[in-house]
Image (cartoon, grey):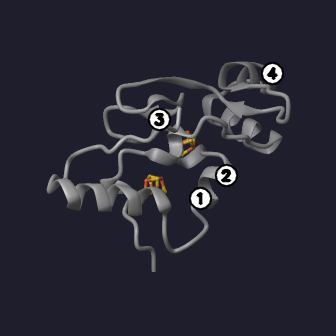
Amino acid sequence: MASYDCSKCPGYCCSYPVIPITKRDVQRLADHFGLGFAKARKKFTVKDDEDDYVLRRKADEHFGKVCRFFDTDKRRCGVYEARPSTCRQYPAASRCGYYDFLKFERELQEDNEMVATTDNR
Ligand code: SF4
Ligand code: SF4
C-alpha cells in the first residue's frame, strides 16, 4: 500500500527539471487536445541533448518552474487522463522520497500546510 498521499503534496515530482516522455506520450497528448503530432510536440515539449521530447515548463510560486500541464491552483496534474507514461509510473514504489521529505518538514515545523522547498529547479 502506498505510504504517500499526492492530494496532500504540492507536486514535487512535477517540478523535476527534465521529464522525458515518449513519442507515444506526445501522440496521446496531441489526441487529447485535438492537435496534430508536430504541433503538440512543439507546444508541449522541448528537445535536449539526450531526449527528443522533454515536457515544457512554466513559472511556479513554490518551485520556480513546474511542468506546463501542472494546475498551479489545485496543485495537481491538469492533464491527468492523458499524462505521459513516466508520470503514470512514478514513484514506482510504495514510498515517495519527496513525500517523506515533506512529511518530515511539516512535522518538524508543526505546520501541515507549509511547502518545504528543495533546490530542485
Ligand atoms: S512528489 Fe510524490 S507524493 Fe508528491 S505528487 Fe509526486 S508522487 Fe505524489
Ligand atoms: S504531465 Fe501531469 S503528472 Fe506529468 S509532470 Fe506534468 S503535471 Fe505532472
Q: Counting other residues with Cα less than 10 Å from the Cα at mark 2, is it few (<14), some (14-19), or many (20 or more)?
A: some
Disc 1 target residue:
90
Disc 2 target residue:
86
**Which badge, 3 or 2, comes first in the chain's sequence?**
3
Q: Marks 1 and 2, Cα distance to the nearest angstrom? A: 6 Å
**In the shown orientation, is residue 28 left or right of residue 50?**
left
Disc 3 target residue:
70
Q: Counting other residues with Cα less than 10 Å from the Cα at mark 3, is it few (<14), some (14-19), or many (20 or more)?
A: many
**Which badge, 4 or 1, comes first in the chain's sequence?**
4
Disc 4 target residue:
38
Q: What element carries label 3?
A: strand
Dot 1 beta carbon under 8 Å from ligand 1: yes
Q: Marks 3 and 2, Cα distance to the nearest angstrom? A: 15 Å
Dot 3 beta carbon under 8 Å from ligand 2: yes
* Residue drawn at x 82%, y 39% as measured from the top left: 23
- Badge number at residue 66: none
Specify the amino acid type for callout 2. Answer: Thr
| Picture quadrant where residue 92 is located | bottom right
Q: Marks 4 and 3, Cα distance to the nearest angstrom? A: 22 Å
Q: Marks 4 and 1, Cα distance to the nearest angstrom? A: 26 Å
In the displayed structure, 21 sits above or below 100; it is: above
